[in-house]
Image (cartoon, helix red, strand yellow):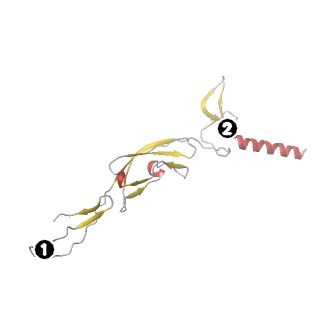
Amino acid sequence: MKKITFYTLLLIVITFSIQGFSRPVSSDIFSTNNDYVSFFNNPINDYVSLRPGYSENRVSTCNDITVFLDATGNISITPVDIDPANIGSNFSLDISSFTCSDIGTPVTVTVTDSNDNDTCTAVVTVLDNLSPTTPTLPNLTVDCNGTLTAPTTTDACAGTITGTT
């Protein structure tokens, strides 16, 4: 008898673990508007489900951001940059790397969770705020018929810049 009771209890625990302890309930007597209620008819707003692979829907709140390119003309962002409430690795961006070609045109990115429960979009404005490298020019002495070479400098996004003499 003890063995049957033990296996019955084990079966009940496994069933509830897989199925979860809470269910959406709606009947002619009462409606919960998709709230979850326990077997004791107590509303449960935040609960931990024991169902494998379950992920509660969340609402992403994307923020438009401005990013600045680094000295190589590149920048990468993560979902947390767009949605600060976004914690963990279960969110992804459709565009995460930006270059000089993205300057001046706002880029729309989408944050999506791994279960496709929610997405949001944000505008990323890419700017290059680094000045070109200033060259050190030597002192030159040239006679009237001499030729000077125009100085050049480089910029991550503008390439080589040639000065005028």
Residue extending farthest to the front is 145
Query: Which quadrant is home to the N terminus?
Result: top right
Q: Residues within 10 Å of mark 2 (few under 14, many from 20)?
A: some
Please name the residue that numbered disc 2 is placed on: 22
Left or right, 134 with reference to 165: right
| Callouts 1 and 2 close, C-beta under 8 Å | no
- Separation (CA) of disc 1 from disc 2: 89 Å
Rendering coords of residue 86 (x, y %)? 50, 49
Q: Residue at x 67, y 46 (%)?
A: 52
Instruction: Give the structural element (helix, strand or loop) at label 2.
Output: loop
User: Looking at the picture, which amino acid does disc 2 mark?
Assistant: Ser
Q: Closest to the observer: 33 or 92?
A: 92
Query: Which quadrant is home to the C terminus?
Result: bottom left
Residue extending farthest to the top is 28
Q: Is residue 99 visible?
A: yes
Rendering coords of residue 65 (x, y %)? 39, 49
| Figure check: 70 above or below 33 | below
User: Looking at the picture, which amino acid does disc 1 mark?
Assistant: Gly
Left or right, 4 with reference to 146: right
Rendering coords of residue 101 (x, y %)? 36, 53
Q: Closest to the observer: 21 or 105?
A: 105
| Figure check: 131 above or below 108 | below
Left or right, 118 with reference to 20: left
Disc number lying in front (1 or 2)? 1
Residue extending farthest to the right is 1
Q: Residue at x 76, y 44 (%)?
A: 14
In which image quadrant can residue 43 be found?
top right
Q: Which mark is residue 49?
A: none
Q: Residue at x 66, y 25 (%)?
A: 27
In which image quadrant can residue 31 be found?
top right
Please name the residue that numbered disc 1 is placed on: 146
